[in-house]
Image (cartoon, grey):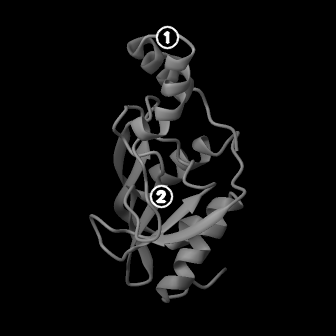
Amino acid sequence: METIQTNTKEIVHQFASAVKNKDFDSLSLLLAEIGEYHTQDKALETVEVKDSASFIKWLKTALTNYSITKVEFDQCLHCYIGNPVVMFNDGKFPPIIKGLFKRSLTGFMLIIVEGKIKEIGFCYTFVNRENPNQIECLKPKIEQLVSMGYDRIAAYKIALEESDKPRED
């Protein structure tokens, strides 16, 4: 059986590796059995679960047809300033939550207590990168559609519908 390190940096890297490799057995060793873990429902709204088994079940489902190809590390700049954040595929996993003013990048913010990950929250504000809101991301597409003759409201609707389609890696 694998020994879990008490070093925070090592735990963060082990978490990232376990998620990337879909190694749920190793992941279960890193997580506290009871904690606070963010997941998503079918509408991509955040749902908090209190046990690691429910988090792992959600993650298995979320990763069923999805591959992690890139892992980056940052820090939280809002709720838990300085806590480690792991970003997968340039912040595309988990998928963004719908809505014009939601942030476009998502990371997993980790709270580690006594060598175990006790909390995992979705993080949107980072030390080392800006995270534009979705309306800012849609602006170029909206302007393109307006220049093609669409009125601004129709352009917003089209750009928003296109942004809701699953993103390619």
The CA span between labels 1 and 2 is: 35 Å
Query: Is 1 situated left or right of 117 in this image?
Result: right
Query: Is 94 situated left or right of 39 in this image?
Result: right
* Marking on residue 113: none
In the rendered structure, which amino acid carries the disc numbered 2?
A: Gly
Above/below status of 1 relative to 159: below
Query: Is 7 situated left or right of 47 in this image?
Result: right
Q: Residue tagged by mark 1?
A: 150
Which structural element holds mark 2?
strand
**Along the viewing direction, whichever of 157 and 17 lies nearer the viewer:** 157
Q: Position of residue 168 (x, y in %)?
A: 69, 38
The residue at 44%/35% (across/down) is 44
The residue at 43%/54% (across/down) is 131
Callout 1: few (<14), some (14-19), or many (20+) C-alpha neighbours within 10 Å? some
Q: Position of residue 45 (x, y in %)?
A: 38, 36
**Along the viewing direction, whichever of 4 and 152 lies nearer the viewer:** 152
Q: Nearer the viewer, mark 1 or mark 2?
A: 1
**Along the viewing direction, whichever of 119 and 3 lies nearer the viewer:** 119
Which image quarter: residue 120?
A: bottom left
Which image quarter: residue 153?
A: top left
- Quarter in which the C terminus is drawn: top right
Residue 38 shows in this picture: yes
Q: Position of residue 56 (x, y in %)?
A: 53, 53
The residue at 54%/71% (across/down) is 73
Q: Residue tagged by mark 2?
A: 107
Callout 2: few (<14), some (14-19), or many (20+) C-alpha neighbours within 10 Å? many
In the rendered structure, which amino acid carries the disc numbered 1?
A: Tyr
The residue at 37%/31% (across/down) is 99
Which structural element holds mark 1?
loop
Whether pointer 1 and pointer 2 mark residues with C-beta atoms closer than 8 Å, the reply is no
